[in-house]
Image (cartoon, helix red, strand yellow):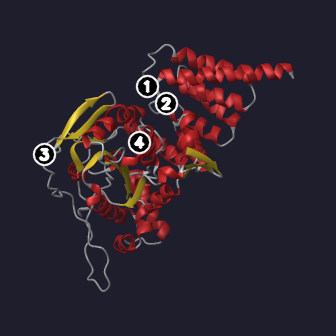
Amino acid sequence: MSQLVGPEAEVVAAYIAARAGVSVSGARHPELLARVEQAMVAAGIPSAERFCERLDQDSASFDRLVVALTVPESYFFRESPQIELLASEVLPERAEARGPEGTLRLWSAACASGQEAYTLAILLDEKGLSGRARVLATDLSLQALETARRGVYAKWSLRAVDDRRRRTYFRAVPGGYRVEPGLDRLVTFQHHNLLDDSKDPRMADMDVVLCRNVLVYLTPDAVQDVGRRLAASLAPGGWLLTAATDPHLDAVEGLQATMTPAGVAYRRVVGASPAVVVSTRPQPPPRSRPQRKPRSRPQPQKTVRPKASVAELESETAEAYVVLVRALGSAGRLEAAAEAAAEAVARYPLHVELRLLQGMVLLESGRPDEAAAAAKAALYVEPDLAMAHLTLARADQARQDPAAARRSYRNALAVLEAVPADKPVRLADGETAGRLAGLARAGQSAGQQVAARMAGS
């Protein structure tokens, strides 16, 4: 960082932590501070005081900076074990608890660009509950909410959607797929900061709250504040689902940790009163007002951080690339995703997930030759990676090489059939070995038919 902007960026980072709860500490501290600095340089405002005033007055600038610090990534039917838990246990149970005339209330908290909220709407429709349910979807990012309301997504966002659901709930449009209008009517999108102290009746008496891959970005104080707010929003017996990577909330009053087939979930203890939320985080300065007196900005806390090893820092940075490539792909920015993947594998050539992501992005971008090379590079690192074999098979199909595709599908099947059918497959977004094996067999069969037609022509 430059000597001019660097110290000022620390002050802005402290402001963001106070206002949005976003943590800039830990091994990612230099990287996140650099992003703050880049935003200041792009705005041409090296002064922390003036830049924070800009963030006060311009919600779009604040929105862009928070997104840059968190890089949200979402897609339909993410974390399939939790989706199965919702479909098989949570929704039927809550529908019974509400009674035949009751309305089910679901909240997708920090919904990003809407894929999670629409996934909930699809589940409700499939369970015959769409006529008696409502989904509230909120996010801090105005830009993400605009995308969510449009309901148009790149193919990459539908990578965990099976063909039946794709035909039923989506229609092909220029640039990707649009959710069917019926789903629009089930979901209400609303701007909301999870750290907002105000009480909104629309965020109360919830049967299900999903707040996944959000808490991991927050400071410890903000995690506890948000946890208490989410607990207070639940109806007695309501469910809260977070991601495996998120901090635990078992210490939050009124929540009971429950072990499920999808991992730990939380439930509002029946009979417990809603928690009174007392914020422990630093409070942001008030919003700008005309002719106000100058105010001081929160100063960065001088904490002693444990020194991270070179290996730990490299791992953090590689994972940041993983998140970035996925986020760009989900947003339909395939060219940018491919560029980020190329930069990432140049720095971390033996990182198998980056190699696999590069192959998947290149395949979706219509570059099958390069996709095949990336998939082979992943297999060089990890020869039994089923997803790399499947990606290579799809690339071979796109290159009109049915013999190579059949060979890759056969290799994928050899790996998948060696593990239990219900076991999630590595780097497959929660997909099980049985389901992927079925897809491999279908692809192998289609390749045989293509080969037969080519031989007869």
Q: Quadrant of the C terminus?
A: top right
Residue 94 placement (x, y as % from top left): 28, 40
Q: CA distance from mark 1 to mark 4?
A: 24 Å
Residue matched to label 4: 124
Q: Earlier in the sequence, mark 4 or mark 2?
A: 4
Q: Earlier in the sequence, mark 1 or mark 4?
A: 4
Residue 298, relative to residue 107: is it above or below?
Answer: below
Front: mark 2 or 3: 3
Q: CA distance from mark 3 to mark 1?
A: 36 Å
Disc 4 marks a residue whose amino acid type is: Leu
Q: Which mark is residue 272?
A: 3
Disc 2 marks a residue whose amino acid type is: Ala
Q: Residue at position x 43%, y 52% from top?
A: 186
Disc 3 marks a residue whose amino acid type is: Ala
Residue contact between numbered discs 1 and 2, judged by CB atoms under 8 Å: yes
Disc 1 marks a residue whose amino acid type is: Pro
Front: mark 4 or 3: 4
* Residue 380 in view: no
Q: Nearer the viewer, residue 163 or 132?
A: 132
Residue contact between numbered discs 4 and 3, judged by CB atoms under 8 Å: no
Q: Quadrant of the N terminus?
A: bottom left
Residue 157 placement (x, y as % from top left): 53, 44
Residue contact between numbered discs 1 and 4, judged by CB atoms under 8 Å: no
Mark 3 neighbour density, 10 Å: few (under 14) some (14–19) many (20 or more) = some
Residue matched to label 2: 428
Q: Does residue 213 appear to the left or right of 221 in the view shown?
A: right
Residue 422 placement (x, y as % from top left): 43, 21
* Residue 46 in view: yes
User: Disc 3 on helix, strand or loop?
Assistant: loop
Residue matched to label 1: 424
Q: Residue at position x 60%, y 40% from top?
A: 361
